[in-house]
Amino acid sequence: MNMRDRLTESVGKPHLSYSSLKYALGDMRLWEMYMRGQLKKESDALTFGTMYDMLLFEPEKAHETYFVLDDSDLVADIGGKYPRSTKRYKEWKAEQIEKHSNKELASQEDWKKAEDMIQRLKDCGVYDKRFAGGKYQVEFNVDIDGIPLKGFLDCLQDDFIVDSKSARSIEKFRYDVNSWSYDIQAYVYTKVFDIPDFYWVVQEKAFPYYPADVKCSEETLFKGEMKFHQALENIQAYLNGNSKTQEHYAEFVV
């Protein structure tokens, strides 16, 4: 039985992704829940990131997908310290959501922030350098050495790959690469498309939205490869009934 069939039989999903590989580096019970679609809760940061990426790469689709809630006039009219906590505001918001039920809701603040961030990328030249002329939101569903991999990459150029990331701090992004396993993502994408050069366009989420053009080093790709194979080992152990993650616990002195 190949891995697609084994995954389908065990967890109901026939492929792996960057996110599933990331979970497989930790507690396999979380990996199982992710694969079964039981980790659905999205953070505000993830929701904003989805909207930002769509506005960056597919602006027409973003305008079709989102309804921007402009509550400035109502907030000013209600006044007070917490106008959005009033019954009047909540009833108005519920009406707006029902009226635009075919679209995702975006606050005016988040939409304006995303637009300002994208404009900063264009003003400084990073957008033209990395994103202009590329193929955006490229989907793949392939088998690499018998491993079924599926996902989307942000931007595919002829001779390099680009992924968009937001961060609290540009200076600390190097640590994010390890803690969020962005190195696995870089390795998988370069492997799937057989293009060795990978870049992150990173942007701070706080004004003035400082951007950075970050090249993924060979060392980081190697670390991603090592993590990739470790994740596969953990998944194979799970599929073979040999996963012992539940026996792990912490022990320390403070």
Image (tube, helix red, strand yellow):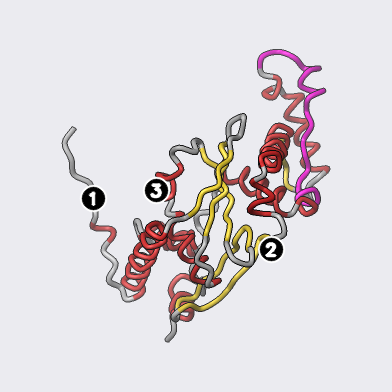
Which residues are drawn in magenta?
62-81
| Element at label 3 | helix
Dot placed on the residue nearer the N-terminal end, 2 or 1: 2
Q: What number of labels is visible? A: 3
Q: Nearer the viewer, mark 2 or mark 1?
A: 2
SS of the residue under disc 2: strand
Q: Can you name the residue that lies furthest to the top here?
A: 80
The quadrant of the image that shows the N terminus is bottom left
In this view, the residue in front, 86 or 37, is: 37
Q: Which residue is mark 2?
A: 135
Pointer 1 residue: 249
Q: Is residue 98 left or right of residue 160?
A: right
Label 3 and label 1: CA atoms lie apart by: 20 Å
The amino acid type found where label 2 is placed reads Lys
Look at the picture and state if 192 lies above or below 249: below
Q: Residue at x 63, y 63 (%)?
A: 156
Label 3 close to label 1 by CB (< 8 Å): no
* Precedes in sequence: disc 3 or disc 2: 2
Mark 3 vs 1, N-terminal side:
3
Residue at position x 70%, y 49% from top? Answer: 56
Q: Which residue is mark 3?
A: 179
Q: Under tag 1, what secondary structure?
A: loop
Amino acid type at circle 3 is Ser
Cα–Cα gap, marks 3 and 2: 28 Å
Q: Which residue reaches farthest bottom?
A: 1
